[in-house]
Image: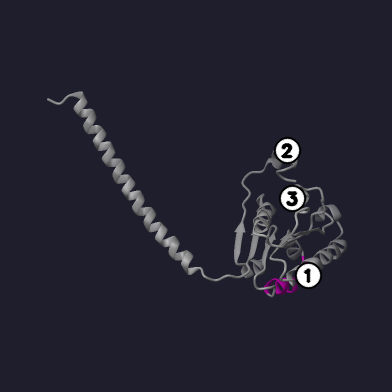
Amino acid sequence: MSTESDAADRSARHAAGVDQTKDARHAARMARKKALIDAAIAAASDERGLLLVITGNGKGKSTSAFGMVARALGHGMKVGVVQFIKSRTDTGEEAFFGRQPGVEWHVTGDGFTWDTQNREQDIATAERGWAIAARMLADPSYQLVVLDELTYLLSYGYLDSDRVLDALAHRPAMQHVVVTGRAAPHTLTELADTVSVIADEKHAFRAGVKAQPGIDL
C-alpha cells in the first residue's frame, strides 16, 4: 500500500523530470538563438563611421548622445560637441565632459526660440554654431561628433538643409556623428544609419517638478 512518503517521492521525481524537460527546452532555444545571433554578427563585417539620429518628444535624447561621448572617451577617441539652441553653460554634462582631455565642447545657442523671439538673431546664431560643426565634420581627427538639437535648425529653416546633409554625407569615412532633437526631418533620417525615436509617456515637469540637477541639468 502506498504511503504518504511514497506519494511525496513520486511527486518530487515528477517535478524534477518536469524541471529537466524545461531546462532542456530552454537550452535548445538558447542554442538556436545563439546560432542566429552569431551568424548575424559574422555577416556584419563592414566598418565605417555611422550617422545616428536620436529624435522624438521624449526625455533622453541628449542624455543618450552624452552616454556615447563617455563610451568614445573610454576608447581613447577624440570627441567634438556642438550644442545648438541651448545657451546654458552650467549643466552637469558640460562641467564633466568639458574638462576631459579629448573633448572639444561648444555651447552655441542663445536659448529657446520662445526666449529669443528674434528669428534674424536665431539664424545668425545658428550659422555661427554650424561653422564650428562644419569644421569638425571636415576633420578626420574627430572620431565622434555630437550635434545636439541640430534638428530644430533644419525644421525651422535656420540652416540650409542641403548644405547640412552634404556635410554629413561627405564627412571622413570613419567619423561617427550623433544628431539629436525633436522632429528630425525625413531627409535626415533617410541619410542616417541608425534612428531612435524616444516617446514621451510621462514627465515630472507636467506634475510641477522643476528641472533637477543631475537629471535634467
Q: Amino acid at mark 2?
A: Gly
Q: Amino acid at mark 1?
A: Arg
Helix, strand or loop status at disc 3: helix
Q: Is residue 18 above or below residue 121?
A: above
> Which of the two discs, 1 and 2, labels the residue nearer the N terminus?
1
Q: Nearer the viewer, mark 1 or mark 2?
A: 1
Q: Which residue position is annotated with label 2?
A: 208
Magenta span: predominant SS is helix
Mark 3 highlights which residue? Answer: 93
53 or 29: nearer the eye? 29
The coloring applied to the image is: one colour
Vertical position of residue 168 compared to residue 18: above or below: below
Q: Which stretch is magenta?
A: 157-169
Q: Earlier in the sequence, mark 2 or mark 3?
A: 3
- In front here: 207 or 102? 102
Q: CA distance from mark 1 to mark 3?
A: 22 Å
Q: CA distance from mark 1 to mark 2?
A: 41 Å
**Residue 115 left/right relative to 35:** right
150 displayed left or right of 125: left
| Disc on res. 135 | 1
